[in-house]
Image (cartoon, rainbow, N blue to C red):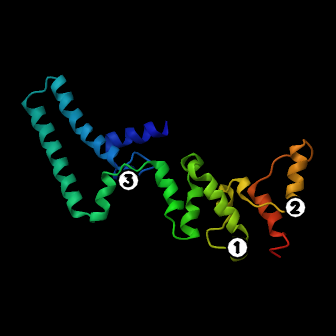
Amino acid sequence: MLRLGVKTITDFTGVIQLRNSPDLGGLYWTVNMFLALLTSFVCVWFGGGGREEWALVLAASGAWLLVFVLFLLLMKKGCRRTFFSTQTGCDWAMDFFRKGKDDEAKQNVLGCNKMMWRAIRGEVKEWVLGNWYRWIEEKPSWFTEAWLSEVPADFIPLDENQIKLNEIRRRGGGRRGSSPADALTQVKIHPSVS
C-alpha cells in the first residue's frame, strides 16, 4: 500500500524528493513523469478534444519539459545522475555499510528495513560483534537507546551468564524473551569492560 501511495502521489504532484532509491528511484521517477505527460495527450485524443484542449495540453507539457531541462542544466552536475539512477532501495541501504568510511556512517544501515540489507546481514553482524565492547567504552554519539532498539538481539555479544540463560531457555525453562536493552545492561557488567 505504501508503494502504491508513493506512486500515486508522484503521478499527481511530481514530488522530486520521491526519486530517491527507497521510494521510486531516479530513472523510474523520470520515466513516470514522461508517461504522465503522454497520458495527457492520450486523454485528449480519446476524449475527442478540440483545438483549445490540444493547445492547453501542448502548452502545459511544453512548459513542464522546458522547466525540467532548465532545472537539470542549472543544478550541480553530480546531482543530475539521481534523475537517471537505477539504484534500488536495497542497494541504497547496503551502501550505508559498504561505502561508510567510519562506524558513524556504517551504523545507519541498522535504521533501514532489515529486508533491505539481508544480503549483507552476516557482514553487519560481524562488524557489530567485533566493535560492541569498544562502543560501550567510547560511547559514540549515535550509540543511543534508539539505535540499540534497531540492533537485532543476535548481534549483541553474550557473556557466560547470558549463554547459560539462553541454554536454559532453549531447553524450555526460565523466563522467555529479552530485548537488546536487557542484553546491554548485562553486557555492561562484563569483566572485560569493568
Horizontal arrangement in the rendering, residue 178 relative to residue 23 (left or right) = right
Labelled pair 2, 1 in contact (Cβ < 8 Å): no
> SS of the residue at dot 2?
helix
Horizontal arrangement in the rendering, residue 193 relative to residue 109 (left or right) = right
> SS of the residue at dot 3?
helix
Residue at figure coordinates x 49%, y 63% from the top left? 99
Residue type highlighted by circle 2: Glu
Alpha carbon separation for disc pair 3 and 1: 37 Å
Labelled pair 3, 2 in contact (Cβ < 8 Å): no
Residue at figure coordinates x 58%, y 53% from the top left? 120
Q: Crowdedness of circle 2 by 10 Å Cα count: few (<14), some, many (20+)?
A: few
Front residue of this view, candidates 47 and 167:
167
Residue at figure coordinates x 9%, y 27% from the top left? 50
Alpha carbon separation for disc pair 2 and 1: 19 Å
Front residue of this view, candidates 67 and 55:
67
Q: Is residue 90 above or below residue 39?
A: below
Disc on res. 108: none
Reading the image, the residue beneath label 3 is: 17
**Residue 61 rendering spot, x and y as whole percentages:** 17, 42
**Residue 124 rendering spot, x and y as whole percentages:** 62, 58
Residue lying farthest to the left in this orientation: 51
**Residue 122 rendering spot, x and y as whole percentages:** 63, 54
Reading the image, the residue beneath label 2 is: 160
| Residue 155: quarter of image | bottom right
Horizontal arrangement in the rendering, residue 31 relative to residue 184 (left or right) = left
Q: Is residue 187 above or below residue 14?
A: below
> SS of the residue at dot 1?
helix
Q: Nearer the viewer, mark 3 or mark 1?
A: 1
Residue type highlighted by circle 3: Gln
